[in-house]
Amino acid sequence: MFVKLTRTFRAGVQNFIRNGWLSIATVSVIVTAMFIINVQVAVVTANELLLKDVQERVNISVYFKTQTEENRVLEAKREFEVISNVTKVVYISKEQALENFKASTNDNETIRKSIEELGTNPLESVLNVSATDPDEYEAIAGQIDRSSFAEDISKVNYQKYRGIINSLNKEIKSNQRVAILLGLTLSIVAILITFNSIRINMYSHRQEIEIMRLVGASNNYVRLPFIFEGIFYGFAAAGIAVPLAFFYLNFISSGETSNSILPFSNTKFIQTFLNDYFIKNIILIVLAQFFLGIFLGVVSSAIAIRKYLKIR
Amino acid sequence: MIVYENISKIYLGSAPALENINLEIREGEFVSAVGQSGAGKSTLLKMLYAEEAPSTGNIYFHRKNIVNLKNKELPYHRRNIGTVFQDYKLLPKKTLFENVAFAMEVGGRTNEEIDEAVPQILDIVGLGKKTDKYPTEVSGGEQQRAALARALVNKPKVLLADEPTGNLDPISTWEIVQLLLKINEFGTTVILATHDKGIVDKICRRVIAMDRGKVIRDEENGRYCI
């Protein structure tokens, strides 16, 4: 068993090496396929991160009239917290709101002076209500409108991010479709090219194969070198595609290169993707890539064997 | 040991290649199948190593019907049968040693076994001093002897020789025939297909004469005459 494996493995290595240019061409095609699949996955993931980020910022801002007592607002907070699908309610007092406002205007002289002149705090206290799902906001806002606090509320604002979320969602879905289609097409191309290389190798080894069959080589012994050959193609391709994708993504997402290279995606989130996902899960990703490459190679050789390596 | 039972082989749109063949070959026999090209000798041999299947009939090898062998069983059946052909079928990029060793390698034999058996068998066929030569560097007769060594190195029960001397000069031919007889003396059943009258007459063993897919004569110690 071990003897057979080492012998067929060696034969596979020889197939791979002795067909220098053919092997290089084959590996290049698989690298291209895997590289583009990688980049697509990165783009889709980056967009999903972007969406998640926007979604997290989305909430319903409930503004209370300035004369409303703080206790009343906290009462409202407790009541809103038990509305179904509400995940959290954050209270921002008038004073806090003023601080935030000052900070957001960078302590602008004129604004500070005009507030001082006013004598009182013109800002309203706010409850920020977050929900499990952006689709719930409309219902929750309605419920807030109908609550017993309606008279104390000056306005309920939840529309701000809706458009962004919707268009982002659409983009992600279409990006995913493109990624899947592109990935599938390129995988098929890669399989076809690999299949063809293995077929050529079978042809150049036809004499050996004939003799193997005559002297009673087991079917696996005849097939394994070509399976190994397919594995090597995929293995070599994965070894190139992973670093290539990493450096490419790193390059386009750093510095001044902008969205133009990757439409619809936020380069910042590609960096996030690289740092938070790629590097943290590097072992898993590399394993998955090798698996993908080897899978492509094995499928190709299996097709070639089925079609061209007759047993009888 | 080998029984052909009502064997016919019919290719669509042509005369039958084999027609109702019934034969029995006993262990240790030396059988020559003679006849013109297209008489069906090669087809008969091919069926024995299951390269071709008969249209009708059964072939028994050691009482096992080999007509419908499963793909998985096929290699094990073929290990019982050594084959040599007119065109030797040696691998040009391997030395004679490597060519013979190849037959053992694919059978999963260890390197120790190979290093022991290959020089031995090459010695027997008289190529002990040419083990490192490539097929193109030796004569046709020597190539055929290397092919014989390869066929024998796995110790098959039967040796099939399909026109082994077709490309050889009379002296080399005679050497090959001598070798076949020697192999037969060691106990291997030999089936030789040939159209060479001279060698069959000299061998003086069982002769099966074939013509247009039929056995027309089958006699012990026969001579070649059609």
Image: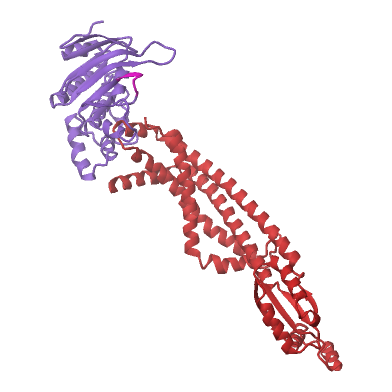
Q: Is residue B154 left or right of residue A234?
A: left
Q: Quadrant of the C terminus of chain A?
A: top left
- Colouring mode (rainbow / by chain / secondary structure / one colour): by chain
Q: Nearer the viewer, residue A123 or A275?
A: A123
Q: Magenta region: which residues? A: B52-57
Q: Which chain is purple?
A: B
Q: Which chain is red?
A: A
Which residue is drawn at the image coordinates 46% and 50% (left, top)? A294
- Magenta span main SS: loop
What is the number of callouts on the image? 0
Q: Is residue A248 left or right of residue B101?
A: right
Please indicate, yes or no, whether residue A261 appears anywhere in the rendered image. no
Which of the 4 quarters of the picture holds residue A45?
bottom right
Which residue is drawn at the image coordinates 74% and 68% (left, top)? A138
Q: Is residue B145 magenta?
A: no
> B211 above or below B123?
above
Provide residue A131's location: percent of width, then percent of height.
67, 71
> B167 above or below A49?
above
